[in-house]
Amino acid sequence: MSPRSEEIYIGLMSGTSLDGVDVAIVDFNEFPPRVLHCQATPYPDSTRQALQALCQSQASSLDDLYRLDAELGELYASTVNDALAAAALDRGDVSAVGCHGQTIRHSPNTSPSYTVQIGDPNRLAARCGITTVADFRRKDIALGGQAAPLAPAYHQFLMHSPAEDRVVVNIGGIANVTLLPANRESQILGFDTGPGNTLLDYWNEKHRATRFDDAGDWARGGKLIDSLLQAMIAGENYFRAAIPKSTGTEHFSPGWLHEYLTRDYDAQDIQATLVELTAATIATAISELPALPANCFICGGGAHNLYLLERLQHQLPRCAVQTTEALGMNPDYIEAAAFAWLARERLDLRPGNIPAVTQARRKTVLGGVYAAE
């Protein structure tokens, strides 16, 4: 039996790793929702380099910004059309596309606070002929929230268990955790812990000319520089900040790292130490939750860093660390599916944020709608 088209949505996620766009075509006719097709489209090198420059520089021009906004809108549209062809679906089968866009600034604690995601949704709707929902974060910001993380609402929908407390850790460029209490009356918590893959990918590419350290093998061969690790943890106030909180790669940037590299350390040892930084800050955040869950489920690109998962398990000996594959869910596409779900919530006029997570003054419907003609 073919799925009913009114419950098919497409989610696009471009994360803080700046590596490309993930696409998930999701059928919400049943529970758990069924992923009909998923794929990852890497950014062209020129696009990725331009995004890195835009995220890390204070001197980029408006021309740079709007050129990339248009370029990403076109790339997202072609990716959606490719995914539809691969899934043998017609655009008329899809209710809407939920497009997160590419975050280039996230500053929830300034006055005024702001967050910026680019990737023109007008072009996406025009090129695909599908109603597009985008700009999911700024309404929460307008209500005094952090606008991040947004995925905990979907984690609750998808992975809540009445039998046990669970924690979900998404390790993208930045890592974030979601506590899902078994008791639905208890408070869901979610916040960014600090760097996920962002510093790992930067340091690996700088020294090995590959985009990431496959399975963490390069880091595994290095030695922990404990003095460097302790300096980074002690020197960064974000790690001790109270929740709710969120951060971005514009903070945990190459410049941030180089402030701590005051000696001529071995490059491989620095990679091993950065793995430990990510593992330790995630583990500390989980250890400080109101309850230590028995199971920790990992999603995002960091799920493929086997050495990172080993170090995280070492840091959390009383918590079983495993990827969301243990729940039958592909860890690479949880976040893309979340924005398919958020598009569905938007069209059905249901709130998409959790004020206990983002600190917004109230629940609210998230996203702007760009109608297909």
Image (cartoon, helix red, strand yellow):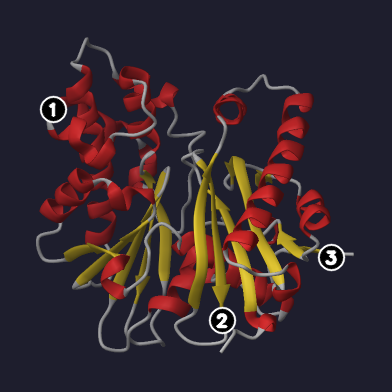
Residue bearing the label numbered 2: 28
Residue at image mark 3: 371
Q: Earlier in the sequence, mark 3 or mark 1?
A: 1
Q: As displayed, is residue 338 above or below residue 23?
A: below
Q: Amino acid at mark 1?
A: Gly
Question: Quadrant of the image for the N terminus?
Answer: bottom right
Q: Nearer the viewer, mark 3 or mark 1?
A: 3
Point out residue 119 in the picture as x, y percentages from the top left corner.
Answer: 70, 45
Q: Which of the marked residues, 2 or 1, is nearer the chain's N terminus?
A: 2
Mark 3: which secondary structure? Answer: loop
Residue at x 65%, y 63% (from the top left corner): 98
Where is residue 114? Give x, y as percent. Answer: 66, 46
**Disc 3 from disc 1: Cα separation:** 52 Å
User: Which residue shows up at 25% across the image and 83% down it?
Assistant: 164
Q: Is residue 62 left or right of residue 356?
A: right
Going by the numbered disc 3, the residue's amino acid type is Ala
Who's the residue at 43% across and 22% down the image? 255
Foreground residue among 186 and 349: 349
Which quadrant of the figure contains the C terminus?
bottom right
Categorize mark 1 by other alpha carbons within 10 Å: few (<14), some (14-19), many (20+).
Answer: some
Q: Is residue 150 visible?
A: no
Q: Are marks 2 and 1 in contact (CB under 8 Å)?
A: no
**Residue at horizontal 56 percent and vertical 81 percent from the top:** 28
Among the two numbered marks 2 and 3 on one chain, the one whose residue lies closer to the N terminus: 2
Q: Is residue 249 left or right of residue 340?
A: left
Marks 2/3: CA–CA distance:
21 Å
Residue 189 seen in render: yes
The kind of secondary structure element at disc 1 is: loop
Name the residue nearer the viewer: 28 or 36: 36
For label 1, the residue is 222
Point out residue 154 in the picture as x, y percentages from the top left corner.
Answer: 49, 72
